[in-house]
Image (cartoon, rainbow, N blue to C red):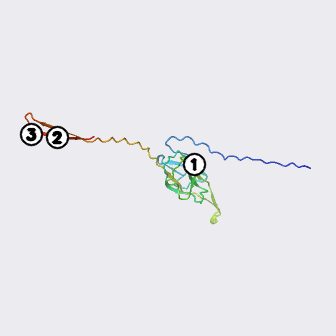
Amino acid sequence: VTVSGWKVCWAAQPPPSLPPLAPCPLGDVCTTGPCLITDGGSCATSPDFPNDYPVNEGCTLYGMPPVGLDVIAFDVEEHSNCRYDYLTVNGVKYCGTSGPAGVVPSDGTMTWVSDGSRLEGVLGCAAAVVTESGWKVCWVAQPPSSPSPPIAPSAPPIEFQVTVGGGGWEGEVSWTLTCSG
């Protein structure tokens, strides 16, 4: 008696790709998802800031200028590896109360993730959703500096003397003029 076996084959599948970001007008900062652009386009906040942010939401801010970020407020669920809720800039996750102050978003993006984690059975609680007040981050793009006009070299002063005399004049009148320019 001969029994046939079976063969299993698999191929690694690439991770799903994110949809491309919609075009953002030059000089503007845009967002996907529920994060808000505030303060005339120079700041962004987590959803519902300064109230607790909702769970299972995220966004990507893009078109950000290459300037250091100013963290106005930052209070996100704490975890040693920022496993649950976090803000990512340049591939670095920020959580707890330490945001990306002074960080320049080199690729012009910043991404927020809130995962909806729960603390189960902690101190006798059946379940508790962990959210905090979130964050507000600003950026101020400095206008490009225009080159200063060249300073003209200063010419040495020119002095000349005018003397009038004779023809019935008694004495002599003299002026010395100095011109610089």
Single out the residue that lies furthest toward the right.
Answer: 1
Residue positioned 16% across, 40% down in the render: 175
Q: CA distance from mark 1 to mark 2?
A: 79 Å
Image location (x, y in percent) of residue 165: 11, 36
Determine which residue is flagged by label 3. 171
Specify whether 6 is left or right of 128: right
Specify whether 71 is left or right of 13: left
- Cβ–Cβ below 8 Å for labels 3 and 1? no
**Given this view, does label 3 or label 1 mark the residue nearer the observer?**
3
Residue 55 vs residue 44, the one in the foreground: 44
Image location (x, y in percent) of residue 177: 20, 40
In the image, is residue 55 above or below residue 63? below
The amino acid on which the numbered mark 1 sits, given as a three-letter code, is Cys
**Given this view, does label 1 or label 2 mark the residue nearer the observer?**
2
Determine which residue is flagged by label 2. 175
The amino acid on which the numbered mark 2 sits, given as a three-letter code, is Trp
The amino acid on which the numbered mark 3 sits, given as a three-letter code, is Gly
Image location (x, y in percent) of residue 92: 57, 53
Q: CA distance from mark 2 to mark 3?
A: 14 Å
In the image, is residue 124 above or below residue 4? below
Q: CA distance from mark 3 to mark 1?
A: 92 Å
Question: How dense is the environment of label 2, judged by Cα within 10 Å: few (below 14), some, or many (20 and up)?
Answer: few
Residue positioned 57% across, 48% down in the render: 59
Disc on the earlier residue, 3 or 1 = 1
Determine which residue is flagged by label 1. 59
- Count of numbered marks: 3
Question: How dense is the environment of label 3, judged by Cα within 10 Å: few (below 14), some, or many (20 and up)?
Answer: few
Task: Identify the secondary structure beneath mark 1.
Answer: strand
Task: Identify the secondary structure beneath mark 3.
Answer: loop
- Cβ–Cβ below 8 Å for labels 2 and 3? no
Image location (x, y in percent) of residue 46: 54, 52
* Picture quarter with the C terminus: top left
